Image: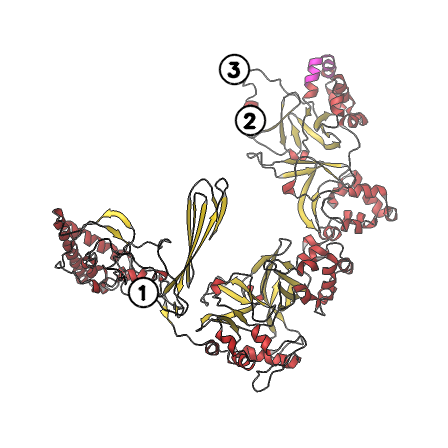
Amino acid sequence: MKSFRLISLVLLVTIIGSSRCFDLFDDVDESLRLTHQFDEDFGNWRKSFQKLKDPSPSSHHSIGLLEGGGSSFGFGWPFSNDRDEPHSREPAEFPYAAADSEDSEQPGLRVVGLERDRESLESDSESLPSGSNPERPLIRPNKSPFPGLDAGSLFQSHFNNFFNGPETSFFGGGGLPGFGFFDVNANRPWWKGENVCVEREEQQEDVDGDENTEIAVDGGNFQSFGFINLNFESCAEHKNKHVCKSVKNHNGQKSTVKVTRQCCHGYARPRNGPPNAQCEKVDLYPMAETAERLGAKEFVATLKKSGLESLLEKDLTLFVTPDSAYTKFAEQMWENNLVAFDASGRAKRQADASGMTARDLVLAHAVNGSYHIEDVSNEQLLKTELADTNIRINIFPRAPTDRSGDHPYRYTANCAPLVKLNRVAEKGIVHVVDRVLMPVRNNVMTVIRNRDDLTVLRTILEKTGLDKTLEQVGDDKHFTVFAPNDDAFLKLDKDIRRKLKAGNGCATNILKNHILDITFCSLAAINGVKTSTYNLLSEKLEFEYASIAKTETEDMTSDKKMQRLRINGIANIEETDLMGTNGVVHIIDTVLPTDSGMPISNALANRNLTIFKQLIDDAGLEDEFDSMTNRTFFIPSDKAFEQSEAGQYWIQQLKEHPESLKDNARLKEFLEYHVAEPLIKTCDLQENMIKTATGNELRVNLYTTNPVFSNVLNRATVNCARLMHFDDETCGSVVHEVDKVLEAPKSNLFDALKTNPEYSMFLALIEKANLTDLLSASNESLTIFVPKNDVFLEVKEWYDQTMDNTEDLDYVIRSHIVPDVICCAGIVQSNWPFIRTTETINQQRLKLNRDRRPQVQNAGVTKCDIVAKNGIIHEINDVISVQKKRRADAEGFPSFARPLTFFFK
């Protein structure tokens, strides 16, 4: 007994000290009283177990704990059935015991606290017809396997006083949540409660046992293998619905079971209730009265005067408009002479130019069948009672700080916000939209064609063929067009406007910058929050509300500034939500610029690559270059022109003889050598040769500047010109800025050595070593480190001796040739122990480093990157000296004469 007292005291102190919910205990006496009560309860429970030491068949049964008489948990629980035990009560006093089924001979058994999170999908279930109320649980408990068993005194007789008393609200009383072990009703999921209807759908499918299948479940896909059995269950809970989907694959037979639990018709969960609020009976009214109670009296009056009262007898989803919005719409139609409303009743409508009547308008708000908003998916089309018209439902998230709504999302019908949702009537459901839904019969391209202020946009769409895209209609076809009006195109440069109207240049990319492949209603943008999405170019568009000054034509009686939706901080949306059958159109006042929509001539000007652009203009090649697509441009900077001999020549021509550049074939070849095909971004560059527009090739090399991770290539060169700025997109092409002017090599390495008299002594060594064929081979990629003649003249005696010693000559000359292309841009500073080396054609290791200039072993590079067809030449200021490798003294024991070579090769 002392041990129980100690346990009870420790438990109570722990609970009091760890929870602020125990402020009810005002004094120590109350705590001691509860401790004593807890001690007494445990003592009585202990006594009941002591009686079990000598059990008799008449005093107890050995059973499995059952959930509602269902499956056993697999262990025996002997217990006393003595009704005279202290605190024992009749079963009727235990509010959490399972109710008896109508056909059960014995009470059902429910053990508190041992409920599963989900009921088995194998359970028998029944769905009540719409409108009926369940008189017994839809999931019937099985009969008890133990006749005569009374579970009324199990657990609650020993724990009720302490754990369910008002003093200890921590366990479920006092309005606070309990542990769920002693208070079943307080924490029972609503979908396991009363007045819940169950719908079960099952599909059978044969699966080839030799093939793997991908099974779609909530939250993603799951790979199923044909040779094993697979059971998978996924459940999702919404405010008014609980759905479990079970997928079973057994011996090639796939079974999919979907069980939906929701409040029966006439019952609903309170909107502002706790998470486990049960389904409660609600008052239902006829459809017309329900709509009127929601403030849509004028809409209902129009419906009745149009002779559509019989429509309300159907199972219907009705989208109604509040009286204020309906009245405003009627007045606008009257002013525009489109639909005439009776001034007094505003009920009778005359036909407008398109033949729309009041009857048509009402039918365009009615959908056959009941559609709860949670049952509708984004972009779903609901067919209305008006022929050939639909209502498009879209779903958008709320702002992170928005807690005003009953739902986590915001919903629109034809881009009109739904302000009241899921109002159930005796037959059907009513949703309230904030404005009248005009019947939608035209696709977005037709919407654009019918606008007088979108003539330029219409012309460009038709020239580029994008009009065919915007005419596509189907459940999976939905577009949003941010349509620049004619005034917006007048703001563009006249040359760009001319090219756009002709469908040339970057017209397609510019238009794709204004088109989304989703329906983006104005409601999607949230005031005070930046909203973003991606267009057909996969470029981000950002939306936010901004205060702008009102024009003279706008109402100046209110504030002089108004909130208007802006795109990328540039374009204002002048008119929103022009619905089409396949999307929506918004009118904007500015053409949205995009790098991928600019021609190369504009891109060069914006990036201050003025000399190359001026050469294009003076050569008369602007239109030709602007029309190029799927190209890669390697553009030298202005500084690169000033530092190279070829660049200085063209600068001089621009200044002194600009007229000679028109149709200049040499200049055209020079410019086109900087253009390669196809479009290659840096992430796709590889060490290879790429062909230019002239037919000649550019050599691409990749290097790393990371001393540790040498496989991370983060530097690129083209003909040894380093890429300084890269991946700038233009219309169908990409621009990389390089630090050197590119010139096509005219000769191979051997011929390049022959043409320079300063290399004659090195060339003599090459010829003496019989390496002329190697340096002349077109399929080689070599790097040669060449000392000038004055270097050899300083060591003339050594030079002469080497010429006479074939072995030394071959070793020396091969130590200056590397079977790879190493540009100066690829030689970076490195420190011990991460010394960079490269291997020569005679397997010697040369150390590479950089101080003020590149260094190779003991020599410094004095002139970099003389490009030949089959490699490059670096001019150095010393003869490379490399000790020959020594063989290991024994197998497995290398020479330590060059430890860096061994350890850091």
Camera-near label (3 vs 2) is: 3
Q: CA distance from mark 3 to mark 1?
A: 89 Å
Query: Where's residue 667, x and y in %?
Result: 83, 43
Query: Where's residue 822, x and y in %?
Result: 67, 31
What residue do we see at 74% from left, 32% from top? 866
Q: Are marks 3 and 1 in contact (CB under 8 Å)?
A: no
* On screen, residue 558 above or below 166: below
Query: What span is in magenta?
Result: 799-811
The three-letter code of the residue at mark 3 reads Glu
Foreground pick, 29 / 311 = 311
Numbered tag placed on residue 669 in the rendering: none
Q: Quadrant of residue 262?
A: bottom left
Identify the element where label 1 is drawn: loop
Local crowd size for mark 2, using a 10 Å CA cut-off: few (<14), some (14–19), many (≥20): few
**Mark 3 / mark 1, whichever is N-terminal:** 1
Query: Where's residue 842, x and y in %?
Result: 65, 20
Local crowd size for mark 3, using a 10 Å CA cut-off: few (<14), some (14–19), many (≥20): few
If the image is split into quadrants, where does the C terminus sit?
top right
Local crowd size for mark 1, using a 10 Å CA cut-off: few (<14), some (14–19), many (≥20): few
The three-letter code of the residue at mark 1 reads Arg
Identify the element where label 3 is drawn: loop
Q: CA distance from mark 3 to mark 2?
A: 20 Å
Q: Which residue in the protein does label 3 denote?
A: 891
* On screen, residue 390 above or below 511: below
Q: Which residue in the protein does label 2 denote?
A: 904
Foreground pick, 165 / 61 = 61
* On screen, residue 110 above or below 221: below
Q: Which residue in the protein does label 1 denote?
A: 136
Q: CA distance from mark 2 to mark 1?
A: 81 Å
Query: Where's residue 42, x and y in %?
Result: 17, 54
